[in-house]
Image (cartoon, grey):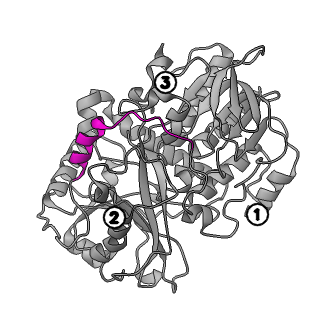
Amino acid sequence: MATSATTQGVQQDHNLPIKLHQAELDDTQFPLLESLPSPLPTPNPTKAFWTHGEDGCNPLAREGSEGPLTSDADICIIGSGITGVSTAYHLIQKFSAEKSLSSLKIVILEARDFCSGATGRNGGHLTPAVYSRIHEMKALYGSDASKHFKIERHTVDSILKIIEDNSWESDVDLVKGGHIQLALSDREMTDILRDIELARENGIEGIDTLEQLSKDEVLQQYGASHPGFRIPGSNLWPLKFVTKLFLLASNNVTSSSSWWGNVMSCLGQTSSTPALTLHTHTPVTEVTKAQGSTRRWALATPRGVVETDYVVHATNAYASYLLPHLAGPNGIVPARGQVIATRASVERRKLWTVGWGANEGYEYWFSRPCPSAERPLVILGGGREASAPRFEYNITDDSATNSAISKTLKAFLPAVLPTQFEQGSDPDMEWVGVVQGSGPSPGQYIAAGFSGHGMPRAFSCAEAISEMIQADRAGTKWEIPDWLPPWYITPATWS
């Protein structure tokens, strides 16, 4: 039941192993960062639960890494995470609706394993914001501030519809358990209440579903000694969803087939039109104008050159490797995030199914589905405040973890939920991923800069790019969708 937001005291827990209220320091340090173009992704990243937590969980890992390279395509997408694969999916959907698929050729180029970047290394949350940062958005964008929330609602609703229409719930481990934001101090409570009040005044969709929970209610229902705010939200296995989406876009998969049968069907069949080809372990090292060709662009890789008319940069934190003018605090800055998978000390039936956030969003976690008698694995991300004042910015090396952050993450859940997690227990797995901490030439497009919130944004940004390409091919004007914040659009698009 939704309730009105009311003020209540929050006694700060000094036993917490984290620094509170670091967002302000983070914001002051960000403009001071160096303008360092990103390198290519490291070849030996840490093993994430999503990519290595289960046998066969990434069946497309090395797809297209050997054999002939596709040398010609209408559209080339660089990156095989949720942005790149969603772009391919939307393109095929839109051109199919136009009945203009017969000759369309799309190729996805990936530097490492399939979906091994931020999408394969994140926290697994799929929850649209309903109040966070609304004061900041209103100050910057006025009446358009509501679109900060519209795009996340549109993204999450679209992804859930695809999952449900294709009966993928169990395939992608979807859990609709809701999401609780804890207030760890009076200041955090005040900031949340202030945002909630403004969200109500502006009629932000979903704000009427918010439920405020007192410290006693949270303690009784969930085991944490802090007040919180509950909203609808979901969690899933991101890599499995992106794999299913790629297979669906390939048109070689049916919703009634088994998971492994779907994969083998896709990999074993001859490509049909439209042609969608994936080449992993094929990093793009340079994009130049094509010479002596009817195509616009030539993409250099260690395996050869791919010529194309349209290039979609879906590399997020690594975008400035190919687009160096995007380096620096006025462009795209990499930020390394760290995640652990740790066991609860109690059985599943004694734990919660909600996702969580705390400390101004710096920490986030949820428990993985498992039989009720087993101790569930909990995915916890955050701890960047332990690396202040640098906050892991301009670090693209995802082959090693930060020991200070490891210590913080290891101690966090036992401090917040002491009856459910044991002090001193080691995580089952620990990994890092590189996200982004905050105009191309004709025929080049970019979707990046999701600031660690790619799951509820990237799918829809890819939809907008597919519409731009569709309009350009048809020689028509692209119209900005109602759900897309206008400040997401680069000046080059408007010109």
Residue type, mark 1 in image: Trp
Report the span colored magenta.
22-40
**Residue 57 sits above or below residue 32 on the image:** below
Instruction: Give coordinates of residue 266: x percent, y percent.
Output: 80, 51
Looking at the picture, which amino acid does disc 3 mark?
Answer: Ile
Residue at mark 3 = 480
Q: Is residue 36 magenta?
A: yes
Foreground residue, 439 or 208?
439
Q: Nearer the viewer, residue 480 or 56?
A: 56
Look at mark 2 in the image and give the residue it sits on: 404
The reply, left or right, for residue 435 in relation to residue 315 is left
- The nearer-to-camera label among 2 and 1 is 2
Residue 102 at x, y percent in the picture? 82, 29
- Give the residue displayed 57% in from the left and 34% down from the top: 463
Sequence order check: which comes first, mark 2 or mark 1? Answer: 1
Describe the element under mark 1 as helix, strand or loop. helix
